[in-house]
Image (cartoon, rainbow, N blue to C red):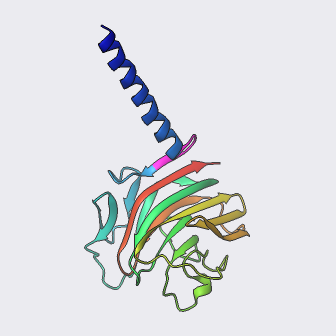
């Protein structure tokens, strides 16, 4: 009897530890939008096939060769929030995370684009910038490694933290609410975890 009580206690402690670890990773208020298992919270823009490979989402079979970028768009619209995303891109990639978007008009002039573009001709709006809104200097590199973007959009206040370092902290009121869009442009682009915390 003592043996089984000991086993039960051990299992209970182990279960509590796992629960504590999961809570520490996501934290109170955080909602998982993508965990490498399904795309239930997202819709494609119709220009490519989005599929999960090895726990990451990628775009394949782009239907229109003239259309450079394809987008995976959140089903829900968001106003004020924190967003965390883990991604991997090749050295030649052009990608980004767009927020407060109209799904029918996604672009750097119609949304806020948190850029992932190491080889952008004008690096002031390259990787870890907000295109046309917040410059980055010096520009960090994202190519050939897993990186993390942490985005805060609290009313007019926009903050971008790239791999633990704040690269942009600005105020701008062009867009106040909309969808999130993950861009699959040039090169290899993979997203493996996306979480959001409404504010």
Give above or below for 74 relative to 115. Answer: above
Residue 74 vs residue 52: left or right? right
Residues in magenta, as a range: 27-32
Residue 50 part of the magenta segment: no
Given the current orientation, which residue lies at the most extreme left position?
A: 61
The image position of residue 67, as x and y in percent, is: 37, 81
- Between 89 and 17, which is closer to the camera in this rendering? 17
The image position of residue 133, as x and y in percent, is: 67, 76
The image position of residue 42, as x and y in percent, is: 40, 56
Which residue lies at the image location 41% right of the left edge and 51% below the top edge?
41
Which residue lies at the image location 46% right of the left edge and 40% below the top edge?
22
- Where residue 190 sits, quadrant-wise, is bottom left
Residue 68 vs residue 61: left or right? right
Given the current orientation, which residue lies at the most extreme front position?
A: 2
Quadrant in which the N terminus appears:
top left
- Where residue 16 sits, quadrant-wise, is top left
Which secondary structure dominates the residues rendered in magenta? loop
Q: Is residue 188 visible?
A: yes
Give above or below for 117 relative to 31. Answer: below
The image position of residue 33, as x and y in percent, is: 45, 51
Give above or below for 16 relative to 72. Answer: above
Given the current orientation, which residue lies at the most extreme bottom position?
A: 121
Residue 26 vs residue 144: left or right? right
- Between 173 and 88, which is closer to the camera in this rendering? 88
């Amino acid at each position: 009897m003592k043996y089984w009580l000991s086993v039960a206690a051990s299992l209970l402690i182990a279960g509590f530890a796992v629960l504590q670890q999961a809570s520490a990773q996501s934290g109170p208020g955080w909602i998982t939008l993508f965990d490498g298992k399904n795309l239930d919270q997202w819709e494609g823009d119709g220009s490519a096939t989005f599929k999960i490979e090895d726990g990451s989402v990628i775009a394949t079979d782009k239907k229109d060769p003239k259309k450079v970028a394809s987008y995976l768009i959140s089903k829900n619209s968001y106003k004020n929030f924190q967003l965390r995303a883990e991604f991997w891109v090749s050295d030649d990639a052009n990608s980004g995370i767009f927020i407060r978007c109209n799904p029918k008009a996604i672009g750097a002039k119609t949304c806020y684009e948190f850029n992932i573009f190491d080889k952008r001709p004008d690096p002031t709006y390259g990787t870890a910038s907000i295109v046309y809104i917040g410059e980055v200097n010096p520009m960090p590199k994202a190519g050939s490694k897993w990186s993390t973007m942490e985005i805060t959009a609290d009313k007019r206040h926009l903050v971008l933290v790239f791999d633990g370092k704040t690269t942009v902290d600005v105020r701008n009121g062009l867009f106040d609410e909309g969808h999130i869009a993950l861009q699959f442009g040039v090169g290899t682009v993979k997203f493996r975890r996306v979480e959001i915390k409404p504010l």
